[in-house]
Amino acid sequence: MPRVTEGSAWARHEEAVARLRASYAAIPAGAPVRLAKKTSNLFRPRARHRTPGLDVSGLDGVIEVDAERQVAEVQGMCTYEHLVDATLPHGLIPYVVPQLKTITLGGAVTGLGIESTSFRSGLPHESVEEMDVFTGAGKIVTTRPAPHEHSDLFDTFPNSYGSLGYATRIRIKLEKVPDRVELRHVRFDDAGLLAKTVAEIVDTRLHDGLQVDGLDGVAFQPGEYYLTLARWLSAEAGEENPIDGAPKALERTSDYTGQQIYYRSIQQRQTDLLTTHDYLWRWDTDWFWCSGAFGVQNPTVRRLWPRRWRRSDVYHHLIGLNHRTGFMDWVDRRKGRPQREQVVQDVEIPVERLEEFLAWFDAEVGMRPVWLCPLVSPGTSAGHQWPTYPLHPGTTYVNVGFWGTVHVGPEAPDAPLNRAIEAKVAELGGHKSLYSEAFYDRETFDKLYDGPHLAAVKQRYDPDDRLLSLYDKAVRDR
């Protein structure tokens, strides 16, 4: 594929990289280095700075899609919404498409991401072939899996959250998909049986004799658990519905961008049919179930709420507004409610410990629903675990996601529930994502996220220590 031709997307990409370099050179030595971007999917407070940030304008698109090779050259700030818009017309999607439209490819690689294909395709960084990384030394470093002179950067970049630099270009593998997705919602009364079923599906890629292409689930309450089994289905092929024998091409797909709400359908129907596009974004419209906090699930409010506002980034902006104004805290005080603790986390639990974690979570936190998403990491090209997020290759984990607030009283500023979750996850041999608040001491953090190795790689690519360390970003909120 050509790298640069006059007037091409490659040329525009090189121009954007030049602007990035110039903006970095303009930041005084000792001043914080940050991205000049208005949106974020992080849920941890960030210090506000008056100094200019890195100019990433023009680094938010798809450079090229090679449908024959099934790869795409993508800029680091490109959202998955735009990436899918470019690949889906070719019948292709990234191996893993995180649930929210405004997550960027670079963000998912450096900050992790997950979705229903993760039980067979791992995490987003595990389908990356090559990256250009803008490092703290002000250089663009092209890095690939081993054997490569910069494979240490490639392997350590996932879960580094900008502490090693920022991806400007990523070559990512794509997989073929049809135009329809069949869903089966399978209920379980016992979390242990659910976990056993997850392990069996991971091993066989089958359930009741049918192929499983996507796998996630929801725990609504103790004794009410669901796995959603997705099967890629081509309407053009006229494949039959194994449930009733009707040709799928003749069936109408569901629409959860209007009055109907996706997560409620899991409890209401055993089977469903979505377009591939709507399946990928089924969780974005209502931010899983979190849109209920804004009244958007009320039928009357929903009819008045513009469809273009039914998306995760709008709700995220409203959360940010509440954090700045303290409105909900004011309402709680007026109504005499205990102070809230924000409990917004995603944790990876070994599948054999899932039942134990859910029971503990019900007793100690009591927040429901929670999302369940199995994943298996294949590891690095050498078969090793990724250093900065060391999941054991080949081991089945279940991501448990929970997002909301809990009334805990005056101890809320000390984050007792979040600290208890961190301890329990470590006890069960799991790991916690770092997109939200973290409260580890430095010794524990370095043990969990291989701090010494990360520091050594950072020293190689950021010798003047221009970029904040991962601990400073994730725990100290600098």
Image (spheres, rainbow, N blue to C red):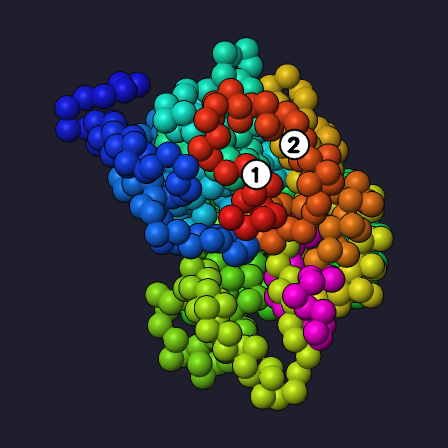
Q: Report x, y in % for residue 318.
A: 44, 68
Secondary structure category for the residue under label 1: helix
User: Label 1: how many residues lie within 10 Å, few (<14), some (14-19) or many (20+)?
Assistant: many
Q: Amino acid at mark 1?
A: Leu
Viewer-side residue, 467 vs 370 = 467
Q: In the image, what residue occupies the spot 61% across and 54% down? A: 437
Residues at badges 1 and 2 in contact (C-beta under 8 Å)? Answer: yes
Can residue 260 be seen at all in this image of the molecule? no
Give the answer, above or below, for where 238 lies relative to 325: above
Viewer-side residue, 152 vs 377 = 152
> Start and end of the magenta stretch?
398-417
- What residue sits right under mark 1 in the picture? 470
Q: Report x, y in % for residue 378.
A: 65, 28
Q: Report x, y in % for residue 197.
A: 78, 46
- What residue sits right under mark 2 in the picture? 451
Give the answer, above or below, for where 338 lies relative to 224: below
Q: In the image, what residue occupies the spot 46% across and 68% down? A: 324
Identify the image quadrant of residue 11: top left
Q: Report x, y in % for residue 243.
A: 64, 54
